[in-house]
Image (cartoon, helix red, strand yellow):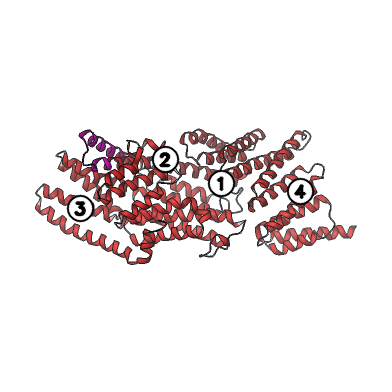
Amino acid sequence: MAAAAEVQGTLQALAARLAGEGHHMQAIKAYTALLGLSLPPADEAGARLRLSALLLEHAANGVPEAKQHLQKAEMLVAGLPGQALLKCEVLAALGRAHKFLGETAFQRQCYAKGLQLCTAAAGGAAGASSSSRRGLAEWGVYFHLHSAESFTLERQPHRAAEHAARGRELAAAAGLAEQQLLCVLFQLQLVMLTWERQAFEQLAPAAVEALQQLEQAPGAGGAGGAALLKLHLTVLQVLMAIRQGNFQELAPADANPPPIVAELEGQLEALPREQLPYCWLPRPCLGALVQLLAATILKPGGKVKPAQLHISRGLSLVDEQLSALGLPPDAGEAALDHVSLYDARAALVLRLHLLEARQQLHLLCSDFAAARHDAAQSAALLQRFPGLLGHLRPCVHLQAGLYAQAVGDHGAALAHFERAGASSDAHLRAAGRCLAALAALAQDAPGAVGRARELLGDLAVAGGGGEGELGYVERALANVAGGLVALAAPDASADETADAKQRLSKGLKLAHGRLQNHQLVSQVLLFMAPLQVGAADSQGALAMVSSSFTLAKGAGDLAAQVAGLSMMQQLYHHARAADKAAQNFNYLGRKQEELSARIQEAEAAAAQHAAVLGWDL
């Protein structure tokens, strides 16, 4: 008996040491050998629990075997008196295995058993130690949060919200500051599924207060937990601000770089170097997300080079994560196993959004060939991972449409924008419809105005009321598109023309004051300049065109520069300023040649050019 116990102890120590040193396959062999002995039920369950963790993380196709060990462990601990914490650990691991196998019903069954166990054990824990009571509460919050995650993935947000709220209540009652904040963050993420601003603003103060309490209580969850929770909250706040179009607050005109960019990068740097305290995103994906947010904040103000640098860093981090998962550059979904699927999805979604942001920057500075390549990469990525990225198909249509519009193929642009306008996302749907209406006007064909009106629908009314509570970006687009469609109507009345001017003015005010979007300001100024000429204010028109040109030149937007110079030419002729007209004419010619050369460069790769224009149509 003593010899058997000695062998058991030796194998246990060996397996633990091998696992700790990173020799995972040898540790799996040691635990397998240990299980060949006759072990007490608790020891056998513990060995199977540790072996399953190694199989889940490090063995190819190890999930089914891990599940078998965990099911055996569950049966072993079920007959043991007490051992509530061990039972919770086994149920949590078994739920994870079911999750990786897509067995959602069994996964939730494990979490339900865990919650029942925590409730029953807590009811009889009057004489238990404080650490045991705290452990039971921590497991209860865990099971609530993972149940909420499961219901979220199954598109049952109301059930998810119930579990998140109950987890938050349990954490608060047990004095678990870190877990309480984590539950509030989950509630915020649920709100962001529908981007309900008011609900977000009601919850956010509770998250801020919980974070402050956590930071002021040394040792409450550890500095690493507080650092990750702080970054998590900041990212959610920035995402909501971007979605609403609050660039006036994110990127004040007098701040370069914006303070929030430095804040995000500082919080990322403050994360502990060791394993993160809870699983939100893999560390490289966290970095990539911060870089994407920084680029998104910088882009509207025309800060192209700094934004491009952030995008490059983000793409490198995403590639680092995909490489760590062992995913070859040309692999598809079939190459992903059950465990890597979740981390790969995060990295792939980020990669597509980074490509989308980079394409917008390339279009802004008139690098149409690079923009074409970005759109082609996005389409190829979606082709390789249709299951994981299928919900982003409208985003790729927007990329293809923006490229088509830039190179003058308004028919293809219209088709792509219409596809984007059919999105289930209200914000993306509104943007697609507005851009489709503008593409229809650009075709300048019979019936174009009627088609544009049809595409806009109720967005044509001032403010874009037909899509509910839109962000400032979509409201600006709706005002501009509605105004231009009204002005383009040959039978527009004086009242309709006046209303159109008012919409353009609203769009300009939003673009300049709220969005800080130089490109949109530049374009709206060009749209409004002819109205000043019609009001016998040629000087006002010239000032608008000059401002538009300055913004376009700063960003390298050749199309806007050519449009501005063309309008200047008309204004100089109208003012009979022959010298200025002659000088401007030569400059306009050079810019037109430069723009034409950029478009020709993009069209030179004929196969890729045609593939992007015709993608998924």
Look at the numbered discs 4 and 3 and tell me whether their residues touch, using CB distance below 8 Å: no
User: Left or right of 291: which side holds 345?
Assistant: right
Three-letter amino acid code of the residue under disc 2: Gln
Q: CA separation, marks 3 and 1?
A: 50 Å
Residue with the mark numbered 3: 565
Is disc 4 placed on a helix, strand or loop? helix
The C terminus, quarter of image: bottom left
Q: Neighbour class for label 2 at 10 Å: few (<14), some, many (≥20)?
A: many
Is disc 1 placed on a helix, strand or loop? helix
Residue 612 spot, x, y in % from top left: 38, 60
- Of the numbered discs 3 and 1, the one sitting upstream in the chain is 1
Query: Which numbered mark, 3 or 1, is in the foreground of this view?
Result: 3
Q: State yes or no: residue 330 in magenta.
A: no
- Of the numbered discs 1 and 4, the one sitting upstream in the chain is 4
Q: CA separation, marks 1 and 4?
A: 33 Å
Is disc 2 placed on a helix, strand or loop? helix
The N terminus, quarter of image: bottom right
Q: CA separation, marks 1 and 2?
A: 24 Å
Q: Main secondary structure of the magenta part?
A: helix
Q: Nearer the viewer, residue 177 or 552?
A: 552
Residue with the mark numbered 2: 244
Residue 126 spot, x, y in % from top left: 77, 33
Query: Which numbered mark, 1 or 2, is in the foreground of this view?
Result: 2
Residue with the mark numbered 4: 74
Across the whole image, how many numbered discs are drawn on residues?
A: 4
Q: Residue furthest front?
A: 446
Q: What range of the chain is rendered magenta?
A: 485-507
Residue with the mark numbered 1: 228
